[in-house]
Amino acid sequence: MKKLLLIFIGMTLAFGAMNAQSPKSMYKKAKKLLSNYYFNPGENEKNLYEAGDLINQALQDSLMSSERKVWITKGKIFNELANNEVKKKILDPNYKIAYPNAAIEAFDALATAYDKCEKSRHKKEVLKLLQETENHLNNIAAYQFQDKNYSEAFDNFVRTCKAYHLFKDAGKEADSRLADPKLRKEQKLYTGYSAYYGGKKDKAEHFFQELVEGDTDQPFVYEALYNINIEKGNKDEAVKYLDAGRVKFPDDTGLLFAEINYYIKEGKLDVLTDKLKKAIELDPNNVTVYTTLGSVYDQLHTKAFENGDSAKTKEYFDLAMKYFTMATEIDSSNFDAIYSIGALYYNSAANYTKEINKYANDFSAAGTKKYDELKAQMLDMFDKALPYFEKAYSINNQDLGVLQALSEIYARKDMLDKATFYRNKLEEAKAAQGK
């Protein structure tokens, strides 16, 4: 009986030893599962996930992690996992990527393997695999970006940039998907965007600075660098990017509003208006400078109204109208100038709406009188805005701002047929523009 018990215990220990796989056996099994997957991907997809778990466990061992071939195997496994994710997303656009780090793990594994390569043929093997990884990183990053998962998008995008540098340092730049300078610049932009909106602004700064040095045509890059440096307390550096952006992209509203807000906070709006007036002196036929200065005064007009300063409200309104009108005198069909005059009247009418609401429930004689007076003034402003929006519509009948304004003005004038017409046009334009 005692002998039988010892035999049983011995069998149990042997069985346990068989199940406690060594790092080397886990590596071998992962390779076998990968081979099975290659042979029949459709039936062996689960094997691929098991292979990923096994190879990660094996690499926790210091001996295994020192082996180039183990890292290469991991790169191959995770390349296939990433490929599966991309294929599922292509077949079903609503598919939610379950393994967003698959391409990341593939790249990190192959980059480690490359560092361990001593022979050129081994390096060539890794670089060949990295070409596949580059595409997976980019595809998954793009899907994450579309879904506004900006942090995850950045983690994938940034490795496409690292992959490019790896190819370049190896003298194989032409083999990288980012060998094209135009595509590389675009990739840096999306990498920076993803970092900026993904809560990694310190990472975004690096890519945006490179884009500025490369003469980017994206005004947001300057705006982002301004914001990043303002948040860091680097005011001088922030203003440097703001000034450079405004010179390069005078029509960009994002930079314009950033500049307006900066000078408002600094109490130096006169610097802004003086700069624009100086620009008019230097280039008197530049319509954009007039509309920009008019926009500054329009913003100041709204701010003065909100502060209850009636004198300044009128002063800034008149100045905005002056420069918008001067712009139309230079170019009578300039859309921005014509639209801006309509918007100036329209926004003034909207300002009256805020005041009207204060008397909406005041049914006293004085309250009713004030309500009627304000309403009449509001409708007068809408009437003045109308011909400018109609003219702007004749120039660009797809502009959403114009269509929105026309539909609302006609609705307030109880001209419901026209209001409906422009509302339908607005919805059609939104659909056509994907908004």
Image: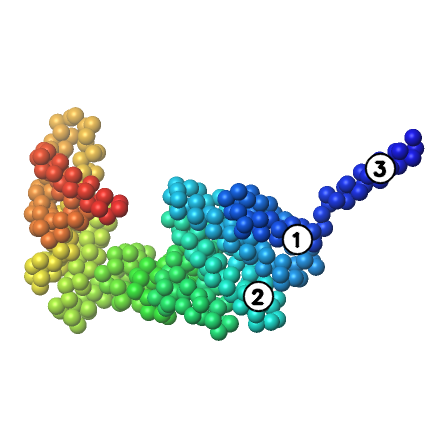
Front one among 15 and 371:
15
- Rendering coords of residue 177 (x, y %): 41, 64
Of mark 1 and mark 3, the one earlier in the sequence is 3
- Mark 3 crowdedness (10 Å alpha carbons): few <14, some 14-19, many ≥20: few
Front one among 331 and 83:
83
Q: Are marks 2 and 3 in contact (CB under 8 Å)?
A: no
Label 2 vs label 1, nearer the camera: 1
- In screen coordinates, is 179 left or right of 421? right
Q: Which mark is residue 9?
A: 3
Residue 349 visible to an observer of this rendering: no
- Mark 2 crowdedness (10 Å alpha carbons): few <14, some 14-19, many ≥20: many
Spot the residue most to the front: 39
Work out how far the residue at label 2 is from the one at label 1, CA to CA, in angstroms: 21 Å
Q: Secondary structure at mark 3?
A: helix
Work out how far the residue at label 2 is from the one at label 3, CA to CA, in angstroms: 47 Å
Of mark 2 and mark 1, the one earlier in the sequence is 1
Of mark 2 and mark 3, the one earlier in the sequence is 3
The residue identified by callout 1 is 28
- Rendering coords of residue 100 (x, y %): 49, 48
Identify the image quadrant of residue 336: bottom left
Identify the image quadrant of residue 63: bottom right
Q: Are marks 2 and 1 in contact (CB under 8 Å)?
A: no
Question: Which quarter of the rendering shows the N terminus?
Answer: top right
